[in-house]
Image (cartoon, helix red, strand yellow):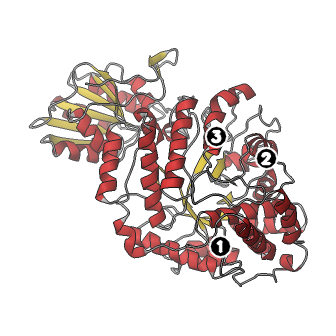
Amino acid sequence: MAPADVGSFRPSSRPGRRSVLLGTAGAVGAVAAFGALGGQAAAGTAGAGTPISPEPPAERTGPRAQAWIRRVVARMSAEEKVGQLLVTHVYGAAADSSDARNAAEYGVATPAEVVAKYHLGGVCYFTWSGNVGPLPGVAALSNGLQAAATGTGAGLPLLISTDQEQGTIARIGPPAAQFPGNMALGAGRDAAAAREAAAITGAELAALGINHDYAPDADVNVDPGNPVIGVRSFGSDPGLVAELATAQVLGYQRDGRIAATAKHFPGHGDTKVDSHTGIPEIRHTRQQWEDLDAPPFRSVIDAGIDSIMTGHLVFPALDPSGDPATLSHPIVTGLLREELGFTGLVVTDALGMKGVRDKYGDDQVVVLAINAGVDMLLRPPAFDLAHRSLLAAVREGRISRHRLDEAVGRIVRLKLANGIVHHPTVDVSAVENTVGTQAHLDRADRITETTTTVVRNDGLLPARVDGRRVLVVGAGGSAVRYLADALADRGADTGTMSTGTRPTDAAIAGAVGAAADADLTVVLTSKAWDTEVTDPQARQRLLVGELLGTGRPVVVVAVADPYDLAYADRAQAGVAVYAPTAVTMRALARVLCGEVGPRGRLPVEIPTADGTGVLYPYGHGLTW
């Protein structure tokens, strides 16, 4: 799309939820209709406090929808438009509940007041912000926030979002269905299962009033030392990642009826730096980007994805300026918009991350991101400063009328096309009939067991546990308990020891002593490969070595990144499960006991411990 084309939006491919098109002629008219921000709209007198279109057209696409979008944007004040660009967290489990953290951060007490004060375009849910409790309460919170949004300013409903990637990143926990994360689905090699997992996840989120999921992760994880992506990726093969990411987009959007978000453009899979704490630099050539990073994004764009999230990473081959992709006009507008043809919504990764804050101040970052071609800004720090900086940039002309109206038009279009304008609220009483149903939980169990990957087995598995003493030990207290309970259900006399990711000498000695009396020991590791942050003194590797030294039967299970298994090559059995969740541990128990045969195949290669070769190749996996 040419930069001057204000409203040329690409339609979605799914029936009934196509994007609103403002064609070339419509775009010219839209510019005129939007008017000058320096006039009444900029002063905040046009549309302030009054819903501007109480009866949106029944059609979500077509000429009437186009006209409605133009009318909405034209009548919005500068404050209302700037508010639509912003997505942030709010504190509390109810829209009208006071929380001192809201007062400290936003100057008002309740979540509803935060929405109304800033005319927010979106809200993002987290457990730490107190939004996720009993699930009917989440739905009620969504309804309360939507009432606040539609009752003030332009009267537009919110995009309510969360990070429900599943696996290791799931903001909405049980009783909602928990599915395997991306790398586990990569091990399963089943696009239909990936789509079904996304469809059920999307349907459950929609029942809670969450209409925008920041998933799937479309990064191709080609660096085993990647500290931030890892199991969030479907794997190291661009074709596999493209296939499964596209399947999930269709699951979320066509079947689950919520907006999906591919991340982190232009690709975060080859870095040893976490963008939360530093500035990753991707050293791929342009051709390597075309071959490795681009295929999943091209595929999801062709499938009609609603939104794409930018990554806070420097990519010199795509933009030699040293600016992170989130702030890069050559990457967001030149590459994503013009070359790849994406005309949907672009949202930033969280703007409090170090990867986007080091080069420019917080007041400049939000302006630079919008001018780069971004439409929505996720959780800028110093929120009031961000809001004031955007408003000043609009009024001073540093953000043009054209760029502002283009971004707001895309946001309004998504809300209309996806039915949020027509139906912003949900039926709280229906939550229990949709979320965490037995049918959904059963499907999660069946899909998960196909992802369990056995990479080593010297005849130990499958194991008989009925009446046997089984020790479950290692990282992840919850995972240890989940597995022990599942084995106990199969007649095992289980003992447990949670030793964490940095087991002490005493914990290691205790585990070795307990293993000497056990018929079988299962040791769980989590990021044992990471001696930079997770386990600086390699204590998990020491634990595994000491347990293997007992000469007793030991199964080593990597409950996060499968790369841990490089340090267990002397074990009788090694298994990768990709997440320490209850559904994963139940599937593991079924495989260990021979109730089902393992079907997973590695979606990445596991290098040798010294990094000089390959221990287990891509596609490796044993069964019986």
Image location (x, y in percent) of residue 42: 85, 75
Q: Decide: is 358 above or below 108.
A: above
- Along the line of sight, which residue is nearer the eye, 14 or 181? 14
Residue in the image at 48% along x and 27% along y: 604
Question: Where does label 1 land, which residue?
Answer: 106
Residue type marked 1: Tyr
Q: Which mark sits nearer the N-terminus, 3 or 2?
A: 3
Determine if residue 256 is in view.
Answer: yes
Q: Contact, CB < 8 Å: mark 1 with mark 2?
A: no
The image's mark for residue 219 is none
Q: Are marks 3 and 2 in contact (CB under 8 Å)?
A: no
Q: CA distance from mark 1 to mark 2?
A: 32 Å
As drawn, the label of residue 297 is 3
- The residue carrying mark 2 is 333
Secondary structure under tag 2 reads helix
Residue type at mark 3 is Phe
Q: Secondary structure at mark 3?
A: helix
Query: Circle 2: is it few (<14), some (14-19), or many (20+) Cα within 10 Å?
Result: many
- Compared to residue 62, the image places residue 505 above or below, namely above
Residue in front for this viewpoint, 615 or 85 = 85
187 with respect to 405 (left or right) = left
* Residue at 14%, 40% in the rendered image: 492
Distance (Cα) linking label 3 and label 2:
15 Å
Discs 1/3, front? 3
Look at the numbered discs 1 and 3 and tell me whether their residues touch, using CB distance below 8 Å: no
Residue, x 78% and y 55% (percent of image)? 8
- Percent across and percent down for residue 340 are 73, 41
Q: Quadrant of residue 204?
A: bottom left
Question: Given this view, does label 1 or label 2 mark the residue nearer the observer?
Answer: 2
Residue 234 image point, x, y percent: 50, 37
Q: Secondary structure at mark 1?
A: helix
